Image (cartoon, helix red, strand yellow):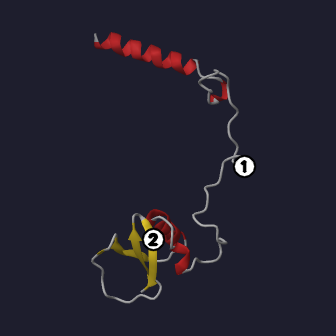
Amino acid sequence: MKMITSAVFLCLTISSCSAMPEGNKPIDEPSGQVRPPISETQKEAPEPVNKAPINKAPEAKDFIGLTLVKAQALAKEHKIPCRVVMVDGKARRVTKDMRPDRLNFTVVKGKVTKVKKG
């Protein structure tokens, strides 16, 4: 029985491989037509987190109004250390060490409302 099951599986695998279009091009399911592969130049670049020039590091005020996720991504993109010190009026535990390059975010309803350095 195991041998028959293995033989059927092998036949199905081989038949599905032979049905693939030439060049392994992806098939557009609804129409069944073959699409040309997307070239490297046609791929969409990810949208930058903020609209500031890429070479210029954002200032603390540039984070206000962003969602926490976007603010953290922007800080990471520019290698700026950051942390969340307050969420919806509740203070979070933080260390008291002073780091002038670090940004402290206050978040209300998922958006950064205040940014302090330290």
Q: Secondary structure at mark 2?
A: strand
Question: Which numbered dot is residue 112?
Answer: 2
Q: Is residue 104 left or right of 27 when viewed as pictured? A: left
Question: Which numbered dot is residue 41?
Answer: 1
Q: Is residue 106 left or right of 41 when viewed as pictured? A: left
| Residue 117 position in % (x across, y down) | 45, 85
Closer-to-camera residue (87/35): 87
Q: Residues within 10 Å of mark 1 (few under 14, many from 20)?
A: few
Amino acid residing under circle 2:
Val
Question: Which numbered dot is residue 26?
Answer: none
Closer-to-camera residue (83/27): 83
Amino acid residing under circle 1:
Thr
Q: Residue at x 50, y 72 (%)?
A: 75
Q: Earlier in the sequence, mark 1 or mark 2?
A: 1
Closer-to-camera residue (25/112): 112
Find residue 100 and report its image quarter. Answer: bottom left
| Residue 9 position in % (x across, y down) | 40, 16
From mark 1 to mark 2, how far is it between C-alphas?
Answer: 35 Å
Is the C-beta separation of discs 1 and 2 under 8 Å? Answer: no
Q: Residue at x 66, y 29 (%)?
A: 23
Image quadrant holding the N terminus, namely: top left
How many numbered discs, if any?
2
The answer to whether 114 is drawn above or below residue 44 in the figure is below
Q: Residue at x 50, y 18 (%)?
A: 14
Find residue 94 and report its image quarter. Answer: bottom left
| Residue 24 position in % (x across, y down) | 62, 29
The answer to whether 15 is drawn above or below residue 47 in the figure is above
Find residue 17 and report its image quarter. Answer: top right
| Residue 12 position in % (x across, y down) | 46, 15
Q: Secondary structure at mark 1?
A: loop
Q: Residue at x 34, y 70 (%)?
A: 87
